[in-house]
Amino acid sequence: MTLSENTIKVLKNFATINPSIKILPGKELTTVAEAKNILSKAIIEDEFPQEFGIYDLGSFISTLGLVDTPNLKFDEKYVTIFDSTGRSKIRYFFDANQEGNSNQVIMPDPQVAFTLTPETFGKIKKAAGTLGHNQISITPNNG
């Protein structure tokens, strides 16, 4: 499996929320801050084949950067990270203590839902920076 740039960016973002992560099989990644005050969920283009835990996500991301195009081969207790030539190989062991920990939080149904695209969010951030604002407010139309 080869990780896309977007998946690596999501993992880097998640490392700022929680240094550890439990990855479940599939295309969905979730993380929760240790204080339980931030929850993040992302649907990625890559599909992880199995469940595994990473104790230090920053270290894992740095390890991925040691090879030109990180390819991953999963085993039960570790993942082998290798380059496009197959000559450079690194065995990165999973966090055995992540077995019982879950980044899943059961949230109630939302009272309000909306879509905020990356493009729109970028425009809002640009406008806020230009106008010197550090807060935004999202309010509904028609009440």
Image (spheres, rainbow, N blue to C red):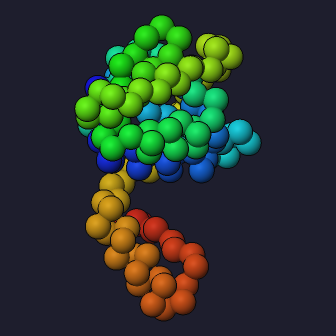
Residue 122 falls left or right of residue 20: left
Above or below, comparing residue 18 to residue 124 in the picture: above
Q: x, y percentage for residue 44?
A: 32, 38
Front-most of residues 10 and 76: 76
Q: x, y percentage for residue 117?
A: 30, 60
Q: x, y percentage for residue 95?
A: 62, 20
Front-most of residues 34 and 48: 48
Quarter that holds the N terminus: top left
Give the residue furthest to the front. Answer: 87
Q: Residue at x 36, y 54 (%)?
A: 114
- Please tell me how many numbered marks the rendered image carries: 0
Give the residue furthest to the bottom. Answer: 131
Residue 52 falls left or right of residue 10: right
Front-most of residues 128 and 50: 50
Give the residue furthest to the top. Answer: 76
Q: Residue at x 47, y 82 (%)?
A: 128
Give the residue furthest to the right. Answer: 35
Above or below, comparing residue 7 to residue 13 in the picture: above
Q: Is residue 50 visible?
A: yes
Dividing the picture into quadrants, the one containing residue 100 is top right
Quarter that holds the C terminus: bottom left
Q: Is residue 44 visible?
A: no
Q: Residue at x 71, y 39 (%)?
A: 34
Above or below, comparing residue 7 to residue 116 in the picture: above
Q: x, y percentage for residue 51?
A: 47, 16
Q: Residue at x 64, y 14 (%)?
A: 96
Dividing the picture into quadrants, the one containing residue 139 is bottom left
Front-most of residues 85 and 139: 85
